[in-house]
Every structure is written in C-alpha cells, then in structure tokens.
Image (cartoon, coloured by chain):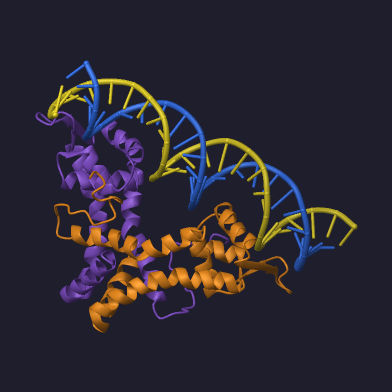
Chain colours: A orange, B purple, C yellow, D blue
DNA sequence: CTGCTCATGTCAACTAGATTGACTTGAGAA
DNA sequence: TTCTCAAGTCAATCTAGTTGACATGAGCAG
C-alpha cells in the first residue's frame, strides 16, 4: 500500500484539542483550503494560479482600474504585480489602455476570455460556499457572514 | 501625505459584487487574514513564521509524533519540513529523541519554551475567534462551525 | 522652455516556502 | 547478509513575494 492517503494533509488531521477554540482555528485553515481547492486546480489547468485569479477578480469588479489602484487593493508591490499581470496581458485576458484625460495612468479591463476564466474560477469557489450555505439555511449563512465580518474587521 | 493607507490592502477593499456570493468569498479571504494577522506579527518578533507555528501547533497536540507522521499531517515534503524544523530544534523549542522500541523513528516534543511560544501564538488567533463568537452568541458560533465544516469537507 | 512630480516600468539581488530527484545512513527484519 | 524503512541531505528548480535604484514619459508650475 504505502500511498494510503496519497495527498497527505488533504483531509483534515485529527489532533487533540488543547483549548476550546482549537477546532475553530483548524476549521479556518481547512475552510480556506476547501474553498480554494477546486478553483486552484482549474486555474492550474489554465496555467494560472492564485495571484492571477486575484488580479482577474479585482479587475472584473473594477473595470478601468488603474495600476496604482490595483496595487493598493491587492496590497503588493508593483514588482510583485508585474509578472502575473504581464502574463495576463500577453495572454490577452486583460487589456490596458491609457485614459483619454488622465494620460498618466493606465486603465485595465478584462477581455471576454479573461471574464470567462475569472467567472469559472470564482464559480468553483462560489459553488463550495453555496453548498455549505444551503445546508446551513438562510440564518446559518447570515450567522457565518456576521462572524467572518467580526474576524475580518478585528482591530 | 502619500502614505494615507500605509499597509495598503490591509483594510478590506470595497469591490462591486458581481454575484450573490462574492461577499462570502471576500470574507473568507479577509477572515483568514484577520485571524492570523496578530499571531504572525508575534511570530515575526520571535524570528518565526507560519510554517514554524504549524509545526509547533501539531507537535503540541501530538506529543511524541514521528517525523513521518508530522509530514503527513502537514502535507508537505520532508525537504520542506527540514528547514523550519531544524530551526526549532536549534532553538530548543522542540526536542527529538529516538524511541526505545521503534528505534527507527524519531519522536518530537515541545520544550517548555516551545510550549510557551505555541500557546502565545495560538492565543492571538483564539482571541480573535473568541471576540467574534462572543458577538455572535452561542448559536451564531455553532452556525459558523457548521458552515466551515461543510466547506472544509466539501468533496 | 525648464524643471518637478506622478504613474508606470524595469533591472537586480534577495528571501521564504515550497517542489522533485537522487543519494546516504543507520536500524530492524527476513 | 541482504532488504526495507525512517530519516537526512544535496542539488536544482519554482512561485511569490520583498527592497532599492533607476528610466521613461506626461502633465503642471514657474
């Protein structure tokens, strides 16, 4: 046998709980992974990865966003952005044009192909969420959102 | 001014929602970050990072775990484990000894110093969760757990 | 027209966290 | 003795990010 659990660490490890909230910590970890697993597999098939998806996701929701604003939203350096963004431009998933008036800044948009990939990748994630919310019901989903907001906005 | 929002991307970006569940996707992203932010800052002060914490966390909950089992739980390669684990051994946060009978495998344990750091790092994360759960109430916390389980166990 | 600033782009060097593949060592078991 | 198993190590590679320095090109203020 040997490869009993091939992608080891893929399933949730069962660890002793030293504290009350340890289960919650682990659920956050495995939850993130569960949500992104299929999307990442899809992206990998397209030769893309999470940073590319983040760019596509943001540009889809802020058409004509400038490079500088994109950097702000993503929270990374321009040097870190340039590789994945240039790939997306080369592949014509994203277009850039200088704006008529503000000629200094460059405006980004998704092409039709870019929209398709963004949508499919995000769909994988939304489907995971949808299934979980369906099981939890409307009030469960609302409670999840409320807790996550408190965590996200902590401090 | 210029540095209005110094650590850009630290606050939640407000993006248009193209789909119903987009808010949920973003909450998962920012939730993970919100939970780990303070813990990561604490770890960085100790010259450690997330992979070290993961090792400490697991060893704390599985004293006398063997290297091979730890690899399984973490889901990484032994080469990836060796750097952070060796640092923890050098710093005497973790000890390893060969087991009396199964002399082939090496058993890992946290030292008192290792336990202290593990606890403090995890405390930062648990505190974030506790505050969020307090606001949500018992039923809200339970709903959050149920949703996260469904997400984590998706597939 | 000159010079300053702003948005972008690029080069280089570095770090961290991972991978795969190949090989060694030391202990137990057949 | 030989085989296997757990661990360890060496090397090369990849991804995703960092900081620092500098170039370019446009718009603006004088």
Tell which residue pokes out farthest to the left in this image: B101
Which residue is at 56% across, 57% downward?
A84
Quadrant, the C terminus of chain A: bottom left
Compared with residue B9, is residue B59 higher up or lower down, i.e. above or below?
above
> Where on the picture, by quarter, is residue B110?
top left
For the N terminus of chain A, the quadrant is top left
Residue drawn at x 28%, y 60% as measured from the top left: A30
Q: Residue at x 62, y 62 (%)?
A: A91
Instruction: Please identify the residue farthest to the bottom as the structure is shown.
Output: A138
**Can residue B5 be seen from the camera position used here?**
no
Q: Nearer the viewer, residue B76 or A3?
A: A3
Give the percent coordinates (x, y) of residue B56.
24, 44
Tell me where residue B35 appears, x and y as whole percent: 31, 60
Above or below, B137 against A89 in this view is below
Q: Is residue A155 left or right of residue B133?
A: right
- Whole-percent x and y of residue A62? 55, 74
Residue A150 image point, x, y percent: 30, 70
Residue B111 in sight here? yes
The foreground one among A28 and B112 is A28
């Amino acid at each position: 046998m040997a490869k009993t659990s091939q992608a080891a660490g893929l399933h949730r490890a069962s660890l002793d709980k030293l504290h009350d909230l340890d289960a919650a910590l682990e659920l956050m970890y495995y939850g993130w992974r569960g949500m992104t697993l299929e999307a990442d597999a899809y992206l990998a098939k397209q030769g893309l990865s999470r940073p590319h998806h983040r760019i596509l996701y943001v540009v889809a929701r802020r058409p004509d966003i400038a490079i500088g604003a994109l950097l702000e939203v993503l929270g990374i350096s321009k040097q870190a952005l340039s590789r994945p963004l240039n790939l997306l431009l080369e592949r014509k998933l994203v277009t850039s044009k200088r704006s008529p008036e503000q000629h200094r800044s460059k405006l980004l948009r998704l092409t039709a192909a870019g929209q398709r990939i963004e949508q499919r990748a995000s769909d994988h994630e939304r489907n995971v969420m949808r299934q979980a919310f369906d099981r939890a019901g409307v009030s469960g989903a609302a409670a999840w959102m409320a807790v996550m907001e408190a965590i996200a906005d902590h401090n």
